[in-house]
Amino acid sequence: MKVAIAGGGISGLACAYYLQRAGIDATVFDPAPGGLIGTTTVEGCVLETGPESWLAAKPEAEALIREIGLGEQIMESNEARRRTYVLRHGSFETLPEGLQLVVPTKIRPVLETRLFSWSTKFRMGLEVLRSPKLMADRSVTAFINDHFGTEAVDYLAEPLLAGVYGGSPDELSAASVLPKFVEYEQRFGSVVVGALRDRKPAPRSGGARPGIFKTMRHGMGTVIDNLRARVNIVTAPVEALAPGDTAQELWRIYVAGEWQGFDSIVLACGANHAAPLVAPVEERTGQLLGSIPHTGSAVWTMAYRREDVPHALDAFGFLVPRGERGAIMACTWVNTKWEGRIPDDKAVLRCFSTNVEVTREEVERDLARLMNVTAEPLFALPYRWPGSMPQYTVGHTARIAELDARVARIPGLHLAGNAYHGVGIPDCIRSARAAATAIARAAVSAQAGANV
């Protein structure tokens, strides 16, 4: 069996790895394999070009990394110094401890925080009295406002989710972005009650709390480099695809000026790129893929002499709500979040924006406004990723259910990536493994049929 994989990001590379491990011939087609994930080292600083970590609670990334022999390089975020600031009225206020994403689970930190008014704190307390209800999919804004009020939308949900999805909570689907909390609403009425019931026990006295983020000691690029060395890659894009004309050749793809035949194809190139490939073959499937909006992002990595950054780097970084946002929507203080990445005499500020074209001057003005950083940086590196962030807008769950059903009826066609069932690195790897597993099962069935 021969499999073509369109797209060489973490999804495509992982899918190729799983297929080759199963003894199936797989080839990745991508003009720049690796996708957003990459690592560079400048003046002793280990820097990421795209995603810097994964959520430790999702096991798929760590399982793959250990399987390819890189387990000893996994490191956790610096939990001893875990703290995140949110800008409110021009000042940094600490996110209260005990948050499960957007849901408070500890009373004292909520009472003490200056992030919310007393009316919002009172409303958060009354939320535990809600009765179960079943509601149609609605926006994150509507969901959070219903449970906790507008301040929780503006200073909690919006800045937290903007960094993950690059979109507005006014449009993001609560059922797709906050599925666990929608389930709590249905079961308990109160999402706080649900979060408390499902909360894992705290570590025993004296034990360090586990890191919520994990990464690679020498950068996320080490995972990509390892996978690229293991799989077959053609550095050219899939320009078109068409049904094959024999039972042994279900698909044909047009690459580098010629048509090639394959038994199966995995589209791991993003829904926005998969849509025009699929539409000529199956119009409705192409429409569904094209209906998933995408936004872009930019990362400016700014390095300074430590003495030129007057603000204490005493947190993982800060978030800027849309009401107070300029160029920067979030900033990671790399020195604090990841031990051993940055020399002691330097400070690295990793600045995020949903404006793909944001300029260095705009970022520097924001750093001066927010952190009083006015010195010339030692270096400034821009990474721009247009069309890289799928938007799980209201109705996403229903659209993906129809998409999955239609793709399942098209022999030899599979999807993988961040546009369908989760945007994180573990989600991408899970989708890649699911596609590889489906293909391997089909190969076993075909072989069994041939032997009858």
Image (cartoon, rainbow, N blue to C red):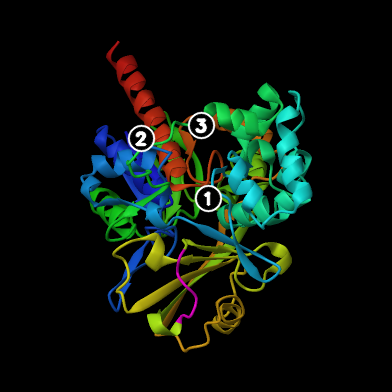
Toward which corner of the image does residue 168 lie, by quadrant?
bottom right
Nearest the eye: 21 or 274: 21
Q: What stretch of residues is rendered in magenta? A: 309-314
Magenta residues, dominant SS class: loop
Residue linked to disc 2: 204
Q: Is residue 19 visible?
A: yes
Residue linked to disc 3: 199
N-term mark: 2 or 1: 2
- Secondary structure beneath label 1: loop
Which mark is in front, 3 or 2?
2
Q: Is residue 199 left or right of residue 128?
A: left
Compared with 62, 228 (above or below) is below
Given the image, on which type of amino acid does mark 2 rest? Arg
Residue at horizontal 75%, vertical 42%?
Answer: 122
Compared with 277, 304 (above or below) is below
Residue at horizontal 70%, vertical 31%?
Answer: 128
Q: Would residue 33 be counted in the magenta stretch?
A: no
Given the image, on which type of amino acid does mark 3 rest? Arg
Residue linked to disc 1: 270
Residue 354 position in % (x across, y down): 61, 65
